[in-house]
Amino acid sequence: SISGATLKNAETESPKPWPATLPHVATTSYDKTYDYPYAYDPTTHKRVDSDAFNPYDPALSHARPHPRPHQPGYMMNRDNDPNRWSYDTVDRPEGVRMFSPAWFKYHWAVQSSRKRLGRLLYIACGLILLAGWLTVTMLFGRNLETNEASNSRFSAHVENGLLPPPPDRIGTLFLVGQLNSFDPFSRNLNLDWTAIQVSQPIDTSDILKTQIDIDRREDTVPLAMFRDVLAVPDLETNITDYQPYRVQNPHVKPVGFLGLTQFDQINTNIGMGQRSTNFWSQPEFGYPFDVFQGKITWVAANNDTITATGRPGTDVQAISGAILTDSLLNMKVRYQVNPTCLYDDAAGCDLVIQLWVTRTGLVKFCVFVVFGINWFVTIALFSLTGESLLLNRHNILESTDIFAVCFSALFALPSVRSLLPGVPGYGCALDLLGILPNMIIITLCTVFFAISRLRLRYRHRAAAAAAAKDQ
């Protein structure tokens, strides 16, 4: 005999009855894990995932039973359940014109019921995100090439407030500085300088196109290079055809010699300071908008004349300008030059080079992404804390997942900061506006969640003890 409780459980756990057209299926075995049939509601034209739906109607659905359901081992599943109704088992609407709104609506419903549309959507979203990221990367690379090409143009490298010198005054001697490295902590910019001679007419868009090889020069002049000195008119000579210049402090020794061979170069470290006292442009503190500024002055003297006359720093040569080559990782170098020898009203004959170092657009983009993600996570956790503690959302409070998320965020968010390129030490504006308030808010949320969980556990124990005492 079967008790009433057993019959009740059997009625509750048993699947829906099979239609009368398939009586032999009701006596076969079935998969008890499959008890959630899919159905189609013809009145609302929507898929209904509910066991309480209307029973099977062969007029609206075409069942696909197992070809041999009477054989042993037959199991009911999603493919042979007659109660599984969906758009793929409903007749196609008649009289629908192709590519009409009704046609698109029908096929949208069909693809949704087969879960193909969702798969295509998330694959398309992934491809769009990948294409967007590649596009952003290519744009940053293109920007790097543009900045490097602009450093080879002469017309853009004239001091503010001065017009470019006339073409007939531009000489053929230029300096080329190759960027090696920049240390934002010690604020030193390292460059290697060489001297080149170009032919007329000069291509101002790219000086290196008209460079003359040193082995083919007929009037090669070895240059003694003096750094951070001034050249003043030399009044101790009898030259009257032109105004000669000499190094102001003749006791200063040259830092190197250029023009003797094609391998001559001078390595320099230029100290970079702050450009202004603005909050956002201060070095390191205003990361990633900080601006470093430095200056170097060159004076080139004829070494043969110095050797022949015994007068150090005499016979200063005019340098028409300078260009920069190469690029630095995550850093953008800009500069302006002032070739005083090319102007009649200038008091000296030297080359003043003003340099600025800023962060590239890629660095700023990464900082914005990290800054936005940190605040997004912080606001989300803060909102969950307010909903659960102030609005008594016990379903959030009783779950341990939110407490684990808060605890994990305490260690995850600060570690993201170390991934930023060239990030300075702790204490910059990014920390004051992002990292520090994020950590304070998440720490408070974690503490409040922990205290609330302990109080909730105490209440549950007290309620259980009271219930046991009443029994």
Image (cartoon, grey):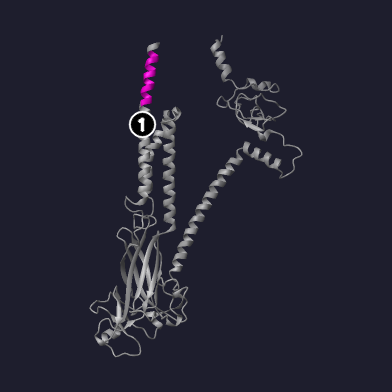
Q: Nearer the viewer, residue 127 or 278?
A: 278
Q: Nearer the viewer, residue 408 or 275?
A: 275
Instruction: Magenta stretch: give its range.
Output: 455-468
Element marked by disc 1: helix
Q: Is residue 453 left or right of residue 80?
A: left
Q: Position of residue 366 (x, y in %)?
A: 43, 52
Q: Position of residue 11 (x, y in %)?
A: 58, 17
Residue position marked by numbered label 1 in the rendering: 450
Q: Position of residue 220 (x, y in %)?
A: 36, 83
Q: Position of residue 49 (x, y in %)?
A: 60, 29
Residue 208, quarter of the rendered image: bottom left
At label 1, counting other C-alpha atoms closer than 10 Å, the crowd grade (few under 14, some 14-19, many 20 or more) is: some
Q: Residue at x 55, y 43 (%)?
A: 122
Q: Is residue 79 above or below residue 270?
A: above
The single residue placed furthest to the left in the displayed view is: 251
| Residue 464 shown in magenta | yes
Q: Is residue 127 left or right of residue 169?
A: right
Q: Is residue 109 above or below residue 190?
A: above
Q: Quadrant of the C terminus?
A: top left
